[in-house]
């Protein structure tokens, strides 16, 4: 309403400005110091390989559910804006001459951004509750609960069209993804401490399997099923819920690390397998 830019151009420019400002702040406030001593040579791939060979079973049993959950979430992460503009608001941004369709599409993208704020808000708030939930029912069942909520949110894409319902849907997905971004790393942290190993390497392994899940979703669902249902974000997101359910049941395979309770880990679930 206030510029001659369309929705996508405005978002790109604002994002570029914010990135530039953050980089500029980092450059200004971070002092540069001369490198007096040459640091030891690091071989990250060798470190990952060695970590794989000695990886505790607690982390090994966490990886399948992390991978499956990432497959479930990935299509939503980049198709939701298009879904809202195309399927819910009935817009179309492929023809620049059709101003009415373009306007509807932009309105859909705007609403998806608001839903995104709800998703990140629920993810943030549940982060505090997740600790208490894990204390009460354990990491295994807390993961199962979070992953099932995300799966329900994805399946609802098949039946919902009212834009307001997607505020609830994105909240469910935020809780599920927040679970995936906290519990596996808590397990890795405890397992690393128990075995006196490098926690950073285990974080790297979790990231590797997250990327594997993203690429499996990209190639299998996005490209593979995309040939059957082209330009159909509703189906791509909804069908991903199957992998969310698989992730929930795979989380029941998790073995929770045991550790003596102390002040450092007083708020972490510790028992069970």
Image (cartoon, rainbow, N blue to C red):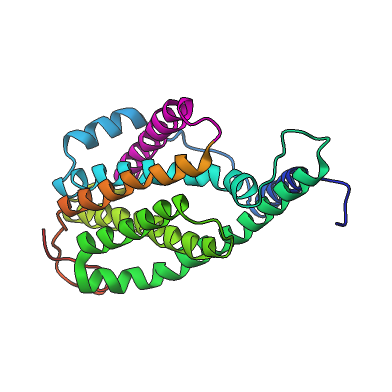
Residue in view at x 50 percent, y 56 percent = 160
Residue in view at x 57 percent, y 46 percent = 83
Image-quadrant location for residue 173: bottom left
Q: Looking at this view, is 208 or 197 the one in front?
A: 208
Residue in view at x 16 percent, y 58 percent = 256
Image-quadrant location for residue 210: top left
Residue 241 image offset from top left, x and y in percent: 36, 47
Residue 138 seen in the current view: yes
53 relative position to 19: left or right: left
Q: State the quadrant of the N terminus.
A: bottom right
- Above or below, 4 against 172 in this view is above
Residue 106 image offset from top left, x and y in percent: 72, 49
Q: Give the number of callouts.
A: 0
| Residue 72 within the magenta-colored segment of the rendering | no
Residue, far left: 273
Residue 183 image offset from top left, x and y in percent: 30, 58
Image-quadrant location for residue 41: top left
Residue 226 image offset from top left, x and y in percent: 47, 29
Residue in view at x 25 percent, y 30 percent = 49
Kindly report the secondary structure that dominates the magenta region of the rendered protein: helix
157 relative position to 200: left or right: right
Provide the residue span drawn in magenta.
202-231
Residue 265 seen in the current view: no
172 relative position to 53: left or right: right
Q: Looking at this view, is 216 or 237 the one in front?
A: 237
24 relative position to 226: left or right: right
| Residue 211 within the magenta-colored segment of the rendering | yes
Q: State the quadrant of the C terminus.
A: bottom left
Q: Looking at this view, is 244 or 56 the one in front?
A: 244
- Above or below, 32 against 217 in this view is below
Q: Looking at this view, is 239 or 267 the one in front?
A: 239
């Amino acid at each position: 309403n206030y510029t001659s830019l369309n929705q996508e151009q405005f978002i790109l420019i604002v994002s570029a400005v914010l990135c530039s400002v953050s980089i500029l702040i980092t450059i200004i406030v971070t002092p540069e110091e001369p490198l007096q001593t040459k640091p030891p040579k690091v071989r990250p791939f060798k470190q990952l390989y060695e970590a794989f060979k000695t990886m505790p079973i607690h982390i090994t049993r966490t990886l399948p559910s992390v991978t499956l959950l990432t497959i479930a979430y990935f299509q939503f992460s980049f198709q939701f804006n298009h879904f809202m503009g195309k399927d819910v608001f009935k817009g179309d941004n492929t023809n620049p001459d059709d101003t009415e369709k373009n306007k509807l599409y932009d309105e859909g993208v705007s609403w998806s951004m608001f839903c995104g704020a709800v998703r990140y808000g629920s993810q943030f708030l549940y982060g505090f509750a997740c600790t208490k939930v894990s204390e009460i029912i354990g990491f295994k069942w807390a993961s199962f609960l979070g992953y099932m909520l995300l799966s329900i949110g994805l399946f609802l894409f098949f039946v919902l069209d009212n834009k307001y319902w997607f505020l609830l849907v994105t909240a469910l997905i935020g809780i599920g993804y927040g679970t995936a971004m906290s519990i596996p790393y808590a397990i890795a942290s405890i397992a690393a401490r128990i075995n006196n190993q490098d926690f950073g390497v285990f974080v790297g392994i979790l990231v590797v399997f997250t990327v594997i899940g993203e690429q499996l979703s990209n190639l299998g669902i996005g490209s593979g099923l995309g040939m059957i249902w082209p330009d159909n974000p509703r189906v791509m997101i909804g069908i991903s819920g199957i992998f969310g359910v698989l992730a929930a049941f795979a989380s029941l395979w998790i073995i929770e690390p045991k550790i003596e309770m102390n002040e450092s880990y007083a708020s972490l679930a510790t028992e069970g397998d």
